[in-house]
Image: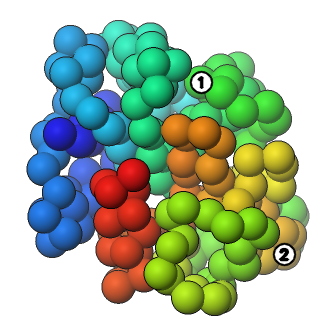
Amino acid sequence: MIAVIDYGGGNLRSVENALREIGAAHQRVRAAADLRRTDKIVLPGVGHFGRMMRALEASGLRRALLERIAAGAPFLGICLGMQALFEGSEEEPAAPGLGLLAGRVRRFPAGARVPHMGWNRIAALSRARLLESTGEGAYVYFAHSYYAPVGPATAATAVYQVEFTALLEDANVFGVQFHPEKSGDVGLRILRNFVEL
């Protein structure tokens, strides 16, 4: 069973519809006890970094997430859910992220039209498990104003004013800056690859 984290925000319905389309059993999870009974975890994210992190802390989900990831449960962060993996974000510097990856999420440079919204090509840097059978240079759908810099866990990049992490993989931790649930057949393939890990 896949847990879809419900922290009171995010694009839950579209993620659930995509999981339903590929036949993946899932349930919304709002409590730490329920999270501990699932096999895989998806953290969708739309909105504000600080509000999401405070909601995860207040519900007890932050600690439970870290415990499950440390125990080896596959985790997929989508958009803001991927940004949560880092130490923090310029969106709210005082709010700590999950700290599973070093570095801070940054705002696109002055002069860039934000949010970066629409279809963009991604370039794989390594053989990424989530990109199996998606083809070279796949196009996916983005909607974000902040980005994760390229680092050791980066498996694919995209360019919008700067090169940034579009997809990351680090052991059982996965993240996508784009929205696979809005990225057509490529996005469904990426979700299926996660489900089939």
- Disc 2, SS: loop
Q: Position of residue 96 (x, y in %)?
A: 65, 20
Residue depicted at x 78% and y 69%? 125
Numbered disc in front, either 2 or 1: 1
- Residue 93 located left or right of residue 128: right
Viewer-proximal residue, 22 or 27?
22
Residue 57 visible in the current orientation: no
Quadrant location of the N terminus in the rendered image: top left
Secondary structure of residue under mark 1:
loop
Which numbered disc, 2 or 1, marks the residue that appears first in the sequence?
1
Would you name the residue on which mark 1 appears?
98
- Picture coordinates of residue 101 (x, y %)? 72, 33
- Specify the quadrant of the image occupied by residue 171: top right
Q: Is residue 35 visible?
A: yes
Q: Which residue does the image show at 13% across and 64% down from the upper left?
A: 23
Judge left or right: residue 15 versus residue 88.
Answer: left
Q: Residue at x 37, y 75 (%)?
A: 189
**Circle 1 residues within 10 Å: few <14, some 14–19, many ≥20:** some
Q: Which residue is mark 2?
A: 161
The quarter of the displayed image where residue 127 is located? bottom right
Between 158 and 154, which is closer to the camera in this rendering?
Answer: 154
Residue 64 falls in image quadrant: top left
Amino acid at circle 2: Gln
